[in-house]
Amino acid sequence: MGTQTNGPLESLDQWDDDVRARYRADRKKEEFRVYDDTTPQVVRDFYKQNHALQTLEFARAKRAEYEPLQKAEMGIWEAMERLNELVDDSDPDTDLSQIQHNLQTAEAIRADGHPRWFVLTGFIHDLGKVLTMWGEPQWAVVGDTFPVGCRWSDKIVYPQYFDANPDSQNPELMTRYGVYDEQCGLDNVNLSWGHDEYLYHVTKKYLPEEAQCMIRYHSWYSAHRELDYQFLMSDHDMQMMDWVRKFNPYDLYSKSAVKPDFDTLKPYYDDLISEFFPKTIKW
């Protein structure tokens, strides 16, 4: 199954279980992404801020600020090195640096014989976290993403924290569709601002559409895992979401305390990056 790369998945649950079993046999599926009173306080505090401050107005303003790609010009490795000291406060499953997590994800994908663009996507999928370079707080960079401008799903982690969000007081935004129309297509939907949306705009002209969707939606768990918000998706969006679900188990279940051997792996990734990207790109 690891070499299947064309068309929708025959069984997403089977794929998820298969990847988990092969890469994290020491941990059960239900031990990942635990968000309750046992979750570390730093994670709960993160989501209190995230859910209170991620408004429709904020997301629109940040997209307008960053989408022109005028912040910097640098290569993929330079961006990767900038992230090496960042530990994601929203993630209860790892305390490794970002480059270590990226290598774990990419190596798991590579071991299953997927195309080189898929491996590259695993390697760069979190590079949007360079937003922290420009002073963005973690609540505006990491964590699960979700649509803003319509009623929040109760399948989003810690949905009770949305009570503190100013949008909750706007009746127009608290209907099922909010400012959107049924099956309007995800290109017309504003997601909470963060590293996924940012990296999508930075890299989209260099990567296949499947990779673009993996990057843009990999943190939108209420959609690709809980299967919510399909009423906003076009038929094409639904097909592309299968690729996000195919990517997600590698991102989630490859997390391990064992650090990848960076020096040994670097030549392979040097070659992979140069195949798809110029020496520098706009950020």
Image (cartoon, rainbow, N blue to C red):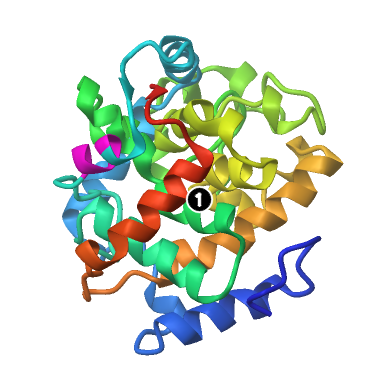
Is 245 contained in the magenta span?
A: no
Report x, y in % for residue 123.
41, 53
Report x, y in % for residue 203.
51, 32
**Is residue 46 found left or right of 202 in the rendered image?**
left
| Classed neighbour count for the residue bearing mark 1: other residues with Cα under 10 Å, few (<14), some (14–19), many (≥20) | many
Judge by depth and name the residue closer to the eye, 271 or 222. Answer: 271
Report x, y in % for residue 184.
79, 27
**Stretch in magenta:** 78-83
Relative to 107, say whether 119 is above or below.
Answer: above
Residue drawn at x 62%, y 63% is 246
Of helix, strand and loop, which one carries label 1? helix
**Is residue 215 found left or right of 43 in the rendered image?**
right
User: Where is the C terminus found, in terms of image quarters?
Assistant: top left
Q: Name the quadrant containing residue 4.
A: bottom right
Q: Residue most toward the left?
A: 85
User: Where is the N terminus found, in terms of image quarters?
Assistant: bottom right
Residue drawn at x 47%, y 17% is 63
**Is residue 157 visible from the viewing direction of this image?**
no
Kindly identify the amino acid type of the residue bearing the numbered disc 1: Thr
Name the residue tied to disc 1: 121
